Amino acid sequence: MKTAFPYPILVGDVGLTVEKVWVDNIPLSLNSISDGERVIALHAVKREWDEIRIKISVSVDADELDSGLWSSPVCVASVRNRRTNIRLSFPLRPDGEGRWDGEVELRRGEHVGRCEIDAWIVAEVKGVEGRLIGRAENPWSADFEAKQPTRQRSVKMVWKNFPEHSFLHDFRDDPWVLHAEADEPVLYLNSAVEGFRALLDNASGAEQKLAREILASQIASEAWTAMFNTALYASATDGDRPEWPGGWQEEVLRRMLPDFFPTSSPDEALAELVGRRANGEGGADLHARLMHAATVSSKKQRTVANSVRALARLAEPKGDA
């Protein structure tokens, strides 16, 4: 589903670039900044700090900007931290040729976890001021917990004896359960299930190893499904535009949405899903698409195919010695 605006907007991409980062006026190592991942890793900033300044630039097609049916375009950078409910705006300076420059500031005490850095271009359109005509195609993240500038994170797995823990007691007979907490999803594995831990941790012999691989892929598939559902319900729309939830929830959505709607952009796919959820439409179709996306993310199709072939080889009669 294409996001429709009742007025002209920029068709070309809005580029957002991070050029430099300073921590209390000390330059941050370029190794902590990834243009490809669009992440600034700030875990190494262990000492006390007061302010982080991030120099950014925003660029659009100059000819399209100059010839559009709007006037007085301006660019604003936004910083949003969902955990602290902080949202700040920083006007950028026009630099000609469809480019704006400026800095955003992160102050200690206002940010934990991760914040998103975005860019908005607004203008007067048909006599109405403040119309959004463009937004950064790919926002940046400043991650205070990331040691490396990457968006990919593994799910934390913890063995627990479910009957011995009150928060897991209701699931005491289940082999695993995922707690999709706001900060970090945790997959709990039930050590009370006889033979379960031994199979996953110490499988021996071809048959046990095959069983372990199939079981692990099933656990991964169900974990991806649970994380996706949590992430989807944390999403919303701001007018006609979807609001990404940030953090690990956004990572899950951006990873799985291309397998939901391969021909749609991430924004279009999220708007489609949020709209269907709100209207109660397409439940069966969405469930089938979710099963497919979870299968792809967990690599279950490859595991099953390899396991079936391996089982067939094990079942073949042995030749005479």
Image: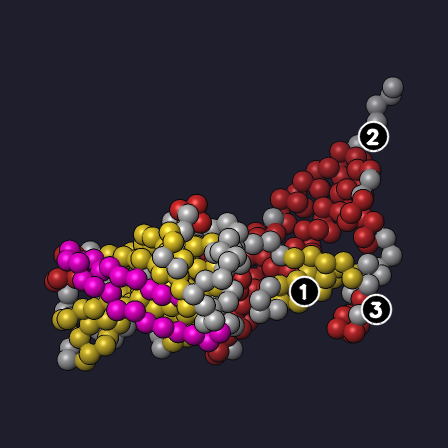
Q: Quadrant of residue 317?
A: top right
- List x then y, in percent, for residue 103: 30, 62
Secondary structure under the numbered disc 2 in the rendered image: loop
- List x then y, in percent, for residue 294: 59, 57
Please tell me which residue is depicted at 24% across the width and 75% down the height of the picture. 131
Residue 298 located left or right of residue 43:
right
The residue labelled by disc 2 is 317
The mark lying in front, picked from 2 and 3, is 3
**Sequence-earlier tag: 3 or 1:** 3
The residue labelled by disc 1 is 178
Is 103 covered by the magenta stretch? yes
Q: Amino acid at mark 3?
A: Glu
Q: Amino acid at mark 1?
A: Leu
The mark lying in front, picked from 3 and 1, is 3
Secondary structure under the numbered disc 1 in the rendered image: strand
What crowding class fits label 1: few (fewer than 14 Cα within 10 Å), some (14-19), or many (20 or more)? Answer: some
Label 3 – label 1 distance at C-alpha: 17 Å
Q: Examine the rendering and report whether any part of residue 224 can be seen.
A: yes
**Sequence-earlier tag: 2 or 3:** 3
The residue labelled by disc 3 is 164
